[in-house]
Image (spheres, rainbow, N blue to C red):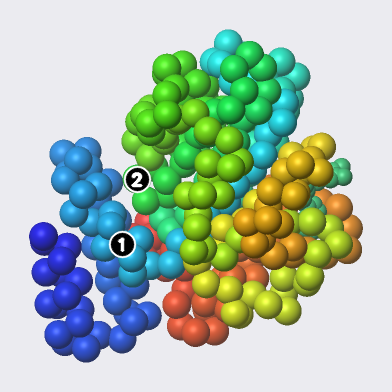
Amino acid sequence: MFAEVFDQTFLKKFAIKPCLQKFLIKLFLKKFAIKPCLQKFSKKAFYIPYVNIVPMRDIVIIGHKAKTDGSFSLNDLPGSAGRMDILCRCVSSALFLSFGMRRDVNVHLLLLGEPDPGKIIRFEGLHLRYLNPDERSSGSLIQKALQKDATEQDIRSTPGVWIRRGDLGFLLSKFEGRTLLYLREDGEDFRAIASEIRDPVFILGDHTGVTEEEEAQLLKAGAKVISVGPISLHSNHCITLVHNELDRVEAERGELPGEADRRNED
Ligand SMILES: C[S@@+](CC[C@H](N)C(=O)[O-])C[C@H]1O[C@@H](n2cnc3c(N)ncnc32)[C@H](O)[C@@H]1O
């Protein structure tokens, strides 16, 4: 209710410009939403208005070999954890700014390796805590999440990290109405269309790419195939590039992403 008052009465009544609205809400959330005592309250009161007002960027990475239990060693993320290092770098590239975090980003790791394929770990930028930019840090939060008994319902592992059972079909159904963008080397140049993109969901493969079956599912769901350049890059580098294109567009519109975070943490 408080958020409603903040949103409807304060921001709209006083005709605050949309770009300033975003800034104020981010500043407000950053200040209050992440305090543990307010988290339960903030989830209900602020999250829904926040996601309705601030366009989100969602990023899905498919880990075909990524382990689906917590029995791997953080010292061996590329080996026994099934190339979990790739997913960890993606988490970091998707969420971290130089000083601060992209609160308008969610990362969804689709884990399809042994022993229990079909788990989804979600990192919510808005509520995330205890994450550092190194691979070991995201690896450790992934491992903690995998130690939970995953079900068909979201289970919170640590603040901003959730786990559930699910597959690509489930994720795509959840994103109905959003702009699905499937990254593939020979797709349409993202730079040429970035300014038209609203509420994007990016989907990327791991070191093995995306299977034919997954690709068919993505195309059936209406995903646009986009490229970030003519050379095959690492998945996390692609994430940096799509962020950069959208950041430039938003900067031109006077809507610098993460600006509130940067000002707070500088
Ligand atoms: C290391 S690449 C996969 C390479 C894999 N050998 C293949 O043939 O698909 C990992 C993922 O990054 C994305 N990717 C890599 N380079 C890209 C580019 N230039 N444009 C768009 N997406 C790219 C794709 O989603 C790809 O599945």
Left or right: where 246 falls relative to 103: right
Residue for point 20% across, 79% down: 11
| Front position in the image: 108 or 233 | 108
Regarding mark 2 in the picture, which secondary structure is present there? loop
Q: Amino acid at mark 1?
A: Tyr
Above or below, comparing residue 69 to residue 119 in the picture: above
Looking at the image, tell me whether mark 2 or mark 1 is earlier in sequence order.
Answer: 1
Q: Nearer the viewer, mark 2 or mark 1?
A: 1
Asked where in the image residue 264 lies, by quadrant, the reply is bottom left
View extreme (top): residue:
71
Disc 2 under 8 Å from ligand 1? The reply is no
Question: Pointer 1: what residue?
Answer: 50
Residue that badge 2 annotates: 127
Image quarter of residue 167: top right
Along the viewing direction, whichever of 230 and 73 lies nearer the viewer: 230
Q: Position of residue 51 (x, y in %)?
A: 35, 61
Q: Quadrant of the C terminus?
A: bottom left
Q: Residue at x 61, y 80 (%)?
A: 195
Q: Relative to 181, is 258 on the left or the right?
A: left
Check contact, mark 2 vs mark 1: CB within 8 A: no
